[in-house]
Structures are given as structure tokens and as C-alpha cells.
């Protein structure tokens, strides 16, 4: 699926870069990723919270997300 970082951040119109979503995520939020292979460096610069971590997960709930 093609994405664009100017998209409205929905399943139908996703961002292009996982890094953009990670940068916008805050404690307790989940970054969902469509199935596929992605080749990018991802840096978590925002801390989660022990009771509200930032989570990265596949949108389909299928195979695990490997980072």
C-alpha cells in the first residue's frame, strides 16, 4: 500500500514512513503497520509510560512485527 506523510493518518490513507507515525505517537498510543517489508531506521524519541507504553503492531493482527 502506498502512503504519504501528508495523508490524514487513517487505514485507508496511511502515512508513508513508520518513523513519522512513531514521532507523532504518545504514551498509550499504538502505531499500526500494514503487512509488508519495510526498510527504514526507526528511532523512538518519545518515552512511553510504564502504564501506557507506545506500541507498534500489525494492522491485521497477523504476523508479529519484527524490529
Image: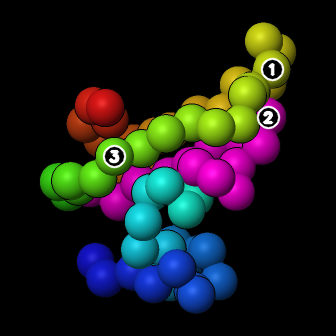
Q: Residue at x 52, y 80 (%)?
A: 5
> At which x and y percent is residue 43?
49, 39
Mark earlier in primary sequence (3, 1): 3
> In the image, 63: left or right of 56?
left
> In the image, 44: left or right of 39?
right
Depicted 33 relative to depicted 5: above or below: above
Give the residue at mark 1: 49
Determine if the magenta segment contains residue 65. no
Quadrant of the image containing the C terminus? top left
For numbered disc 2, what is the local secondary structure? loop
Q: Which residues are magenta?
A: 22-35
Depicted 25 relative to depicted 66: above or below: below
Q: Residue at x 49, y 74 (%)?
A: 15
- Residue 22 in sight in this render: yes
Give the residue at mark 2: 27
Q: Residues within 10 Å of mark 1 (few under 14, many from 20)?
A: few
Amino acid at each position: 500500500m502506498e502512503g504519504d506523510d501528508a495523508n490524514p493518518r487513517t487505514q485507508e490513507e496511511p502515512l508513508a514512513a513508520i518513523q513519522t507515525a512513531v514521532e507523532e505517537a504518545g504514551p498509550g498510543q499504538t502505531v499500526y503497520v500494514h503487512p509488508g517489508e519495510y526498510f527504514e531506521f526507526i528511532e523512538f524519541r518519545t518515552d512511553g509510560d510504564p502504564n501506557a507504553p507506545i506500541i507498534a503492531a500489525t494492522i491485521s493482527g497477523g504476523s508479529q512485527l519484527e524490529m
